[in-house]
Image: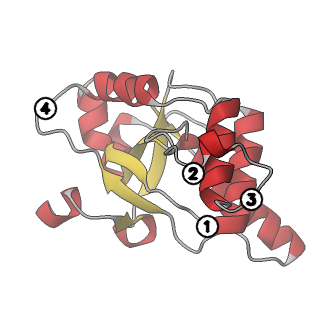
Amino acid sequence: KKDMITNIISINELGKKVAFVNGNRAINKKNLKQKMDSIKECGQLTPIIIVNGEEAAKEGLILVDCETKNAVPANEVADYVVDIEGQHRYTAIMELRKLDEKNNSSFAPNDIIAMYAQNPQGVKIKKLISELNRTSIVWDGKDYITGAALCNPNNELLPVSYTHLTLPTTSRV
């Protein structure tokens, strides 16, 4: 179990259900569609960040089953991991799976990659969620131009001033 804390892991291999924290950000339909489009094109690029259900419940957090949308009973929290960063990614993959089944397509990844939250200071999960939400940013127009310049350095239509910039290190996920 100790090596699972620092490795990227498979949700399938964990054999646990996934829950969200009641009161965390609601799923935004526009963001969800963007995630679905991205995953269709590129797959899941970054892992979701999880904690054990028991840890979240000990802190008084209410867990909501991602599939049923019902509160997780206290006697079942050990059967769950909690997605504290990546709700839109997780939901996008699950929605793509439904579409794949309906349309006989194969856009959704077979597995969802995750990693346990790195929390050496023992910060409360509520604070981790707040910090993860606070440090995520939405790209503005300049960020998109910078991204286009990075992908197309020889494109004469992109301003020269953008071809030597770097992309932001954080993005809204």
The residues bearing labels 2 and 3 have C-alpha atoms spaced at a distance of 35 Å
Question: For mark 3, what is the residue?
Answer: 155
Residue 31, x across and y down, in percent: 70, 38
What SS does tag 2 mark? helix
Q: Pick the residue in front: 18 or 161.
A: 161
The residues bearing labels 2 and 4 have C-alpha atoms spaced at a distance of 25 Å
Question: For mark 2, what is the residue?
Answer: 90
**Circle nearer the viewer, 2 or 1:** 1
Locate the C terminus by quadrant: top right
- Which kind of residue does numbered mark 3 sit on? Asn
Q: How many marks on residues?
A: 4
Q: Earlier in the sequence, mark 2 or mark 4?
A: 2
Instruction: Classify residue 29 by image quadrant.
Output: top right
Q: Mark 3 touching mark 4, by CB under 8 A?
A: no
Question: In the picture provided, is 151 more to the left or to the right than 107?
Answer: left
Question: For mark 1, what is the residue?
Answer: 43
Question: In the picture provided, is 137 more to the left or to the right than 115?
Answer: right
The residues bearing labels 2 and 1 have C-alpha atoms spaced at a distance of 12 Å
